[in-house]
Image (cartoon, grey):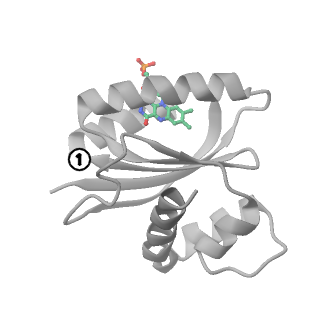
Amino acid sequence: MPFRLIYSSEATPGLATADLEEMLAESRIRNRVCGITGVLVFVDGAFLQIIEGEKDDVLGLMERIERDPRHRSIKVFHEEEVDERAFASWNMAYLSPSTEEVARWVELEGGTTIGSVLSSVEREPGRLPGMVVNILKAIANP
Ligand SMILES: Cc1cc2nc3c(=O)[nH]c(=O)nc-3n(C[C@H](O)[C@H](O)[C@H](O)COP(=O)(O)O)c2cc1C
């Protein structure tokens, strides 16, 4: 059964777009080899990542990601076995939406920061299934 993990983190200040692109390119190659799929969302200095794969592979990857100095304040807020992968077609899709768009994904109303949006999702996991659906829509209609 595939396993899905969702976490958020803060990008280390000074992380450049070129660093991010290089990290994404390397991740996609490694994920293809390891059978990992998912999405990386970068918004206003924060990361939100969904990782899917065999449980051992996902947890092994998460250990490496947690040691990575390119981000900090890592919060794993969801881990579950799933019937099927939601991101089966993407070794690591990438989105860079506005905070407002992320708030809409999780059905929160306006005028808020990405930190408060992510805290709400962490506190209220009931918002996650809708968020996954809305991320898939955003990938399909960039
Ligand atoms: C926000 C973020 C997301 C990452 N996502 C992945 C990923 O999906 N797959 C991956 O192999 N590495 C990812 N990495 C890189 C890993 O942290 C790590 O550098 C890489 O797996 C190599 O591991 P190693 O340095 O222990 O050899 C990510 C790093 C960051 C900062």
- Tag 1: amino acid: Lys
* Nearer-the-camera pick, 140 or 52: 140
Q: Residue drawn 24% across and 64% down?
A: 82
| Mark 1 CB within 8 Å of ligand 1 | no
Write the residue at 31% across / 34% down. Answer: 60
Residue 56 position, x and y percent, is 22, 40
User: Would residue 40 appear left or right of 90 to someone viewing this image?
Assistant: right
Q: Give me the residue at 79% from left, 27% from top.
A: 14
Task: State whether residue 65 is above or below residue 80.
Answer: above
How crowded is the residue under tag 1: few (<14 C-alpha within 10 Å), some, or many (20+)? some
Residue 77 against residue 92 in the figure, above or below: below
25 or 5, which is in the foreground? 25
Horizontal and vertical percent position of residue 129: 42, 74
> In the rendered view, does 43 fall on the left or right side of 75?
right
- Is the C terminus in the top left, top right, bottom left or bottom right quadrant? bottom right
Q: Residue furthest right?
A: 111
Q: Is residue 129 left or right of residue 107?
A: left
Residue, disc 1: 55
Residue 11 drawn at (x, y percent): 69, 37
- In the image, 92 versus 111, the foreground residue is 92
Q: Quadrant of residue 18?
A: top right
* Residue at the (36%, 34%) spot, across then down: 61
The image quarter containing residue 26 is top left
